[in-house]
Amino acid sequence: MVKYMKHIILIFLIINVVSAEDWLVETVDSEGDLGDFTHISVDILNNPHITYRQVGVDVKYAKWQGAWLIETLPFDEAGRWTIDISLDAFDIIPHISYWVSASNELRHYKRVSTSAWEYDVIENGITVDMSRIVVDKSNNIHVIYSDSSGNLKYAKGVTVGTSTTWYKESVTTGVSSRTIDLSIDSSKQPHIVFKNINTNRPMYGFKSGSTWQIGEVNTDTVTSQRVSIAVDKNNTVHICYQSNNSLRYVKGTYGSLSSAENIDSGAGKYISIAIDNNNITHIAYYDETNKSLKYAKYKSGTWFTQTVDGGSADVGKDCAIAVGSDGIPQISYYDATNKDLKFAKVKAPPPPDDSISLKLINNVFNPKKGEYMNIQYTLSIPTNIDLKIFNVVGDLVREVTSGYQLNGNYVERWYGDDTKGNTVPSGMYLVILKSNKYKIVKKAVVVK
């Protein structure tokens, strides 16, 4: 069922009215007792990819492709705390970290076809309590994980061809817990936040060269099930956690973090933070007082919060948030009353007056049969544009057109050929239209 919720929040500074976001809320999967331990990433088309578990059975994966496509992953649910998902450098291919209890292996899984995954072992002979994974813009794979003795470890996977080599190192010993998170900065260096199991205080660290810098965020006592970290485009670190039954937020750099501020009270046991391309901070969190999913956004010097879902059910535990290139926040979360996986996203605003649009006609075609695809696009104002076609690993296949164009409607044809005039292999391709301000990505499929 799809629900729409509107809220108005008044913030009295001078007399300032801030309108709440308009959310689309839906159930993704209700086939059994499932939906907790969820994580989310958003691909190049701004479609969500979600991992979660089905209690006592297995781990599942859902992605949006015009409809929800759901599959069971090839491992059991025993390592449910350890599952996490990240997309590759091109925001296309999902990567998953997961501990397999039967073999005591921490594994890295990668999608290799529409129906198959392959894996390599990060570390064997280990009991893992939690893992987090991020793939950077060079397609290096970063994993932070804690073992059953409270040791925090870091692994970096470097892939050459089809082979991945893992470089592992210790970060801390005897102080880490299941409450950890990972983010990567613009220099592809890892930043981590975790709860010290001896003091229960929030800890922050980053890797500088070959060494780790680790220190306390402050003297707060962490009471949340999760802590969360994100690094923005300016390499400013944003950290959130719960302390004294309140959602707390800190930002800054190592050695120069801000004082913690309260965003909300009676909330924050489950929490997730994301930064969009405009450096706007978005937080999804669970309000345990009202048993609801809430959302916080920091913009123009003001925190704005609202309820996304709740009232008739206990919803919002294990929430995770991601923001795509369109700047729209998307949240996966657990419905504890109905034992379902749920999803919420802000409804897209109407296109601005200077927008562009792109439409593919006959986007599944066979060049060998003389078929082709029409590429229709519209420019609302005169602008410079680039219309290019890429394969799914980011290689340029063909530049269709580029340069300054007047406002109006345009049509181009693609016959399934590359820049040399050769017919491309069967598979999926990305048609990308860029103007001075906007970018649109659409999918095309060549079959033979």
Image: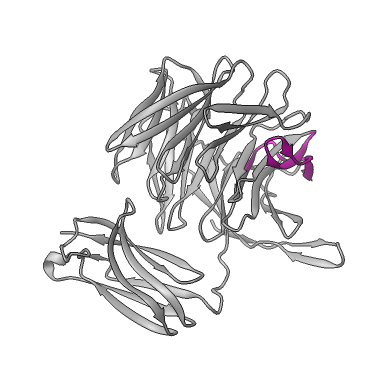
Magenta residues?
Answer: 244-272
Q: Is residue 273 above or below residue 108?
A: below
Q: Nearer the viewer, residue 35 or 161?
A: 161
Q: Residue at coordinates 42% horizontally, 85% vertically from top-left?
A: 408
Pick the front one: 84 or 438: 438
Residue 402, x across and y down, in percent? 36, 74
**Lateral position of residue 135 relative to residue 6, left or right:** left
Q: How many marks?
A: 0
Residue visible at 67% across and 36% down in the picture: 254
The scheme the figure's colours follow is one colour
Q: Nearer the viewer, residue 372 or 390?
A: 390
Front in this rendered view, residue 79 or 304: 304
Rendering coords of residue 3 (x, y %):
59, 59
Residue 103 visible in rendering: yes
Horizontal side, residue 318 vs residue 263: left or right: left
Residue 250 in the image, given as x and y percentages of width and height: 72, 41
Q: Is residue 181 above or below residue 445?
A: above
